[in-house]
Image (spheres, coloured by chain):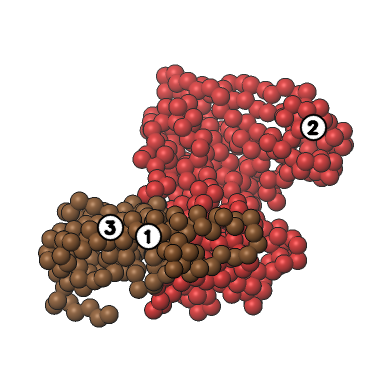
């Protein structure tokens, strides 16, 4: 990714900081512990909280707000628990999502879709854990795909 | 000058203050709660490789010798301040001395050490003139009957029946050089300290390298090949109430890594860091040297898996995002935190504490060294001397 100074918006970070949830963004000193502990980053390294914060601080408004990556956060607050500067990145993501909706980068409908996907995934997880638990004392390793087929009735 | 002073704490700051006060002709009571003076720094290892790395660890034995040879300084180990009152600009101080082990009789022969099945007798640092009894390990302090060490002692230095002594001293000024507490790495649960044996603290590495010649740090023949140092553990951390740089961790970590490589040239080292603080004498040079031999990754790991080798979860290996890295030893560069005694000391001496819990001095009661905030060995020593000089000037002004 290249950064072009003339296309940067120096006011962006102040807007994020003024938005509920974004208050602490400017105190980040980029230690990277947010990304290092993030379960989403672990399955998709393109999702990088440290990088998103840096992009906001640099003023990369459009790149941040139109990015699909914003919607990958699962709101587990692990980054927030780890952050030595109390940045509360999960809340920052919330603020950025609000701004993306408000500024027309995504339809308001989409935010609700993502919430529903989260709930669906949690139910699926609950059912898969329950299915796996039936054989929790057996030495054989459960196969997630098989469990998925089992709980979705395929 | 016919005056007297109380210095609380026998680390580098307390010793520095005591020497400076004595040089001005002031009688000094140097009170140390442990069984030996020297403080944390006396346990540290000389980090010289093929040349001196200016870590200042050698200053401590040098100053311990000086202070023992200073007739105006009365060194009181196993002693605490239990009472404190002010009267017409002077301080009446009640001291209490634990006398189970009499340092005047102890000749450090080591027979008690061998006799104790619990390892409760210890030599706090290589320069300690007498042994100490660790009350947390000793059976007698746990209420049991035992006198193995006392019976083994050929000089009668150990006697559990000997009562502690209390007496009052009257002094013109007080220097509180009560030191600090290394950060408790257990608080960083996900880094695995206390759960995984090969996750250790910088302090433990110091002590191990001080004990042995090579890098067999656990004493079981195993040698680390691929070491990770994680910086800023418990420093610059708002969540830990430590919104400050501890000023020592970059310095000790880089020098310790250099020492390990000097002892075992095959040792690979990676530093995980936010930014390296290169303050202090001669440190830029050490850092440049380290840049050539060690890997530097700008990112603090969030989590360590207790596998063998250990697996670090991190962000920041050049060009990559989330990734994992394997190391066979992880050293947590723990920082300086306020001593847990500070609350009690502040109450006793009527001192204030800053927002982090470090002590602040006042008229007649000065604060020196890490009791007042993070400092390294040479800074603590210098601060002790500087504080004493300030106190002397003030005292001279009052008398003159």
Question: Relative to B166, does residue B139 appear above or below in the rendering?
Answer: below
The answer to whether the residue labelled 2 contacts the one labelled 1, judged by CB atoms less than 8 Å apart, is no
Where is residue B31 drawn, in percent x and y?
A: 59, 34
Q: What residue is shown with label 1?
A: A121
Q: Which mark is residue A61?
A: none
2 and 3 marks in contact (CB < 8 Å): no
Q: Residue at x 72, y 30 (%)?
A: B142
The answer to whether residue A84 of the structure is visible from this angle is no
Percent across and percent down for residue A143 are 54, 68
Give how far apart the Cα atoms at labels 2 and 1 are: 68 Å
Which residue matches tag 3? Answer: A115
Farthest-out residue, left: A103
Q: Quadrant of residue B322?
A: bottom left
Residue B158 circle label: 2
Which part of the image, by quadrant, shows the C terminus of chain A? bottom left
Chain shaded brown:
A
Chain assignment, label 1: A
């Amino acid at each position: 990714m290249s950064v072009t100074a003339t296309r940067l918006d120096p006011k962006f970070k102040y807007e994020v900081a003024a938005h509920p949830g974004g208050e602490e963004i400017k105190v980040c000193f980029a230690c990277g512990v947010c990304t290092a502990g993030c379960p989403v980053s672990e399955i998709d390294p393109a999702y990088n909280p440290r990088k998103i914060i840096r992009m906001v601080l640099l003023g990369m408004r459009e790149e941040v707000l139109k990015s699909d990556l914003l919607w990958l956060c699962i709101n587990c607050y692990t980054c927030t628990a780890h952050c030595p500067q109390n940045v509360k990145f999960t809340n920052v993501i919330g603020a950025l999502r609000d701004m993306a909706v408000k500024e027309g980068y995504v339809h308001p409908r989409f935010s609700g879709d993502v919430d529903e996907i989260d709930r669906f995934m949690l139910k699926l997880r609950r059912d898969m854990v329950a299915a796996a638990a039936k054989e929790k004392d057996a030495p054989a390793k459960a196969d997630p795909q098989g469990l998925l087929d089992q709980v979705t009735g395929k | 000058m016919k005056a007297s002073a109380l210095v609380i704490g026998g680390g580098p700051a307390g010793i520095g203050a005591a020497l400076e006060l004595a040089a001005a002709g002031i009688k000094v009571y140097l009170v140390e709660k442990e069984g030996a003076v020297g403080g944390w720094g006396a346990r540290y290892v000389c980090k010289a490789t093929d040349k001196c790395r200016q870590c200042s660890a050698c200053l401590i034995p040098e100053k311990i010798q000086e202070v023992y040879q200073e007739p105006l300084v009365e060194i009181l180990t196993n002693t605490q301040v239990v009472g404190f009152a002010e009267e017409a600009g002077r301080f009446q101080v009640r001291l209490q001395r634990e006398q189970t082990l009499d340092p005047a009789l102890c000749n450090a022969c080591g027979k008690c050490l061998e006799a104790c099945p619990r390892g409760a007798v210890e030599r706090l640092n290589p320069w300690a003139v007498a042994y100490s009894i660790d009350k947390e390990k000793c059976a007698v302090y746990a209420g049991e009957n035992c006198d193995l060490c006392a019976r083994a002692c050929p000089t009668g230095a150990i006697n559990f029946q000997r009562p502690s002594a209390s007496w009052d001293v009257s002094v013109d000024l007080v220097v509180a050089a009560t030191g600090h507490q290394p950060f408790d790495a257990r608080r960083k649960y996900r880094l695995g300290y206390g759960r995984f044996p090969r996750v250790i603290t910088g302090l433990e590495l110091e002590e191990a390298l001080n004990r042995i010649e090579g890098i067999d740090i656990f004493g079981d023949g195993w040698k680390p090949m691929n070491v990770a140092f994680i910086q800023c553990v418990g420093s610059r951390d708002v969540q830990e109430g430590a919104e400050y740089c501890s000023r020592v961790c970059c310095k000790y970590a880089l020098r310790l890594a250099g020492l390990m490589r000097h002892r075992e040239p095959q040792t690979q080292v990676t530093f995980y860091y936010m930014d390296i603080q290169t303050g202090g004498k001669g440190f830029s040079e050490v850092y440049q040297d380290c840049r050539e031999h060690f890997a530097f990754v700008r990112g603090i790991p969030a989590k360590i898996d207790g596998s063998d080798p250990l697996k670090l979860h991190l962000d920041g290996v050049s060009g990559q995002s989330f990734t994992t890295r394997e190391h066979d030893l992880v050293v947590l560069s723990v920082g300086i935190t306020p001593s847990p005694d500070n609350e009690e000391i502040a109450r006793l001496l009527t001192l204030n504490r800053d927002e982090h819990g470090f002590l602040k001095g006042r008229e007649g009661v000065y604060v020196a060294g890490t009791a007042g905030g993070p400092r390294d060995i040479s800074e603590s020593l210098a601060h002790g001397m500087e504080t004493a000089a300030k106190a002397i000037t003030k005292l001279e002004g009052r008398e003159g």
